Image: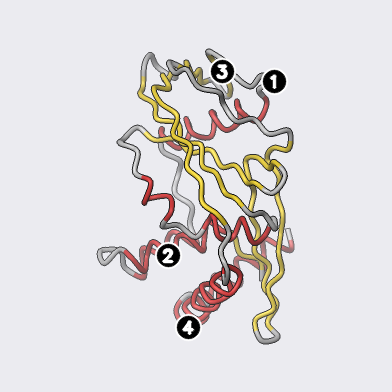
Amino acid sequence: MRISVTDLDNFRYWRQDEDMTLDDLRGRLLHRDPPSEAMLAGTALHHALEHASEQTAHSLSALGYTFVFDIDAAIALPVVRELKAVKEYDLDGRKVRVVGKVDGLHGKRVDDHKTTSSTFDAEKYLDTWQWRYYLDIFEADTFRWNVFQMRAGEPTEYVVTNLHPLETCRYPGLQADCERHLRDFLELVDQHIPEYAAQQAAKDAA
């Protein structure tokens, strides 16, 4: 079975949110909601940064969006960008592949770009499983978020008002934690969302 890091973080969110039901999780895993305006803008900024050629820029454009940088800070643009990798976990004979795609890879450091229109909250990012799996999958030591805080300007234009770099590191037992979380996820979907496995198999066959 092939599982995305996004699905494993959706499972984490369901565990922590008392108001989120099992049906809500089932919907997230099986049916992707149409992207919101914020998600579309975030995708556009990722695309712009992927193809940017300079370490700093006053504005970037992609996918019909323009981003004006009202900040005095260098933008991290590693040479290796938008890299996908898969790691196979052997869970007592059950082989499961977890796939992740990083925005940038610089030596032993993974870079991930995020956008927000609200107040920067470091715990929101540190509480996820994404960074743990990415460090494990890519055999990296440091994970760095580049959180772009921005506000809407003209239609399809956003002004980036701040850039918050945030780093965390590999720790002893990280792989064991990833395996434990993966086991818990598989136990839940096996018992309550068996159609998930069929959906993933269909994706693999496509």
Between 34 and 44, the one lying in front of the other is: 44
Q: Amino acid at mark 1?
A: Ser
Q: Which disc number belongs to residue 100?
A: none
Which residue: 41% across, 57% down? 127
Foreground: disc 1 or disc 3:
1
- Residue at 55% x, 44% y: name it: 144
Identify the mark at residue 60; answer none if there is no mark. 3
- The kind of residue tagged 3 is Leu
Task: Of the two numbered discs 3 and 4 on the same chain, state the one appearing first in sequence.
Answer: 3
Using a 10 Å C-alpha cutoff, classify the residue at mark 2 as few (fewer than 14 neighbours), some (14 to 19) or many (20 or more): some
Q: Which residue is mark 2?
A: 12
Residue type (three-letter) at the residue carrying disc 2: Arg
Tag 3, which secondary structure?
strand
Q: The C terminus appears in which quarter of the rendering? A: bottom right
Q: Position of residue 9 (x, y in %)?
A: 47, 60
Q: CA distance from mark 3 to mark 4?
A: 46 Å
